[in-house]
Image (cartoon, grey):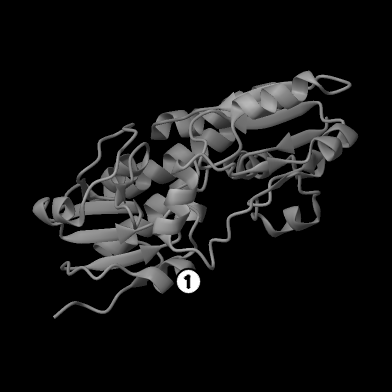
Amino acid sequence: MRIVSLLPAATDIVAELGLLEHLVGRTHECDWPAEVASVPVVTSTGIDQNTLSSREISATVHHGSSLYGLDTDLLNDLKPDVILTQDLCDVCAISYEKVSETVRLMDVGPKVLSLEPSTLDEVLDCLRTVGDTLGVDSNDKIASLHHRIDHVEQQTRTLEHPRVAAIEWLDPVWPAGHWVPEQIAKAGGVPLIAAKGEHTTPITWQTVHDANPDVVLLIPCGFPPERTLKELPDQRFPETWVLDGPSYYNRPGPRVVRGIEILANVLHDIGPAPEPGEALKLAPWT
């Protein structure tokens, strides 16, 4: 079985299922686990997130510029049996439409599997979908992930739940929807601004203030914490955290469960403290 993953979350799933040895191609954004570094890269982007501001990146994306390139010659040479992709967000990864068009022109047509989860249950169900396609039993993996979530819920159920706003883009301000409100709720918080499964739209910082959050989470899509720290908003909230969005909140893969565990520690000091780089509490505003 030869697998090409055109979605970082799908690469996470392949790793969770123990199939990394079958991964023959990946995106330039697939960075976990470390072993994928040796896997050929079949995508590219012309956007430099280190030099452009959030506003400039957003303007580039929404002015119709091509966000991702696909090396069709390399993809054809890799001769994949299965290509894992998505049709949820053209900003998060290369589009299903572009992949389908490329596959149509290939010498041998691989199976294309599109993953489109919007809720936490759907994220975990993707393990079953991928496992079934690749001939791997995922039941134990899924049960273990659900057990970890249930454990966090049991620990936080009787505690006071703080009001939490999660922001997945800084300029314009974009609240984190889809599975993130559920991550917050499972970790013992009250999600604000966005609802379970919601595909959100831009808001203003005033809307965030009006929601009266106790805690604000900054998890810009595709920004590791060190990149987020370069562009902190000049806003005052009771408590603000910068979290590792790409690893635990932006990507609909199995590591969203680790994201819930990190949030439980952030909100309630429950469980092991986050590892360096997973969560950073900003100095309290005075």
Residue 91 showing in the rendered view: yes
Q: Indicate the position of residue 111 as horizontal and vertical percent values.
A: 74, 20
Quarter occupied by residue 240: bottom left
**Counting other residues with Cα less than 10 Å from the Cα at mark 1, is it few (<14), some (14-19), or many (20 or more)?**
few
Residue 270 visible within the image: no
Residue at image coords 78%, 42%: 25
Q: Quadrant of residue 96?
A: top right
Name above or below for residue 270 compared with residue 197: below
Give x and y (percent) for residue 231.
38, 69
Q: Which residue is mark 1?
A: 226
Is 125 positioned to the left or the right of 73 in the image? left
Residue 152 vs residue 29: left or right? left
Residue type at mark 1 is Glu
* 109 relative to 52 in the view: left or right: right
- Residue 245: give x, y in percent of width and height: 44, 55
Residue at 43%, 40% in the rendered image: 147
Which of the image's four quarters has the N terminus?
top right
Label 1: which secondary element:
helix
Q: Position of residue 118 (x, y in %)?
A: 41, 31
Q: Residue at x 36, y 46 (%)?
A: 151
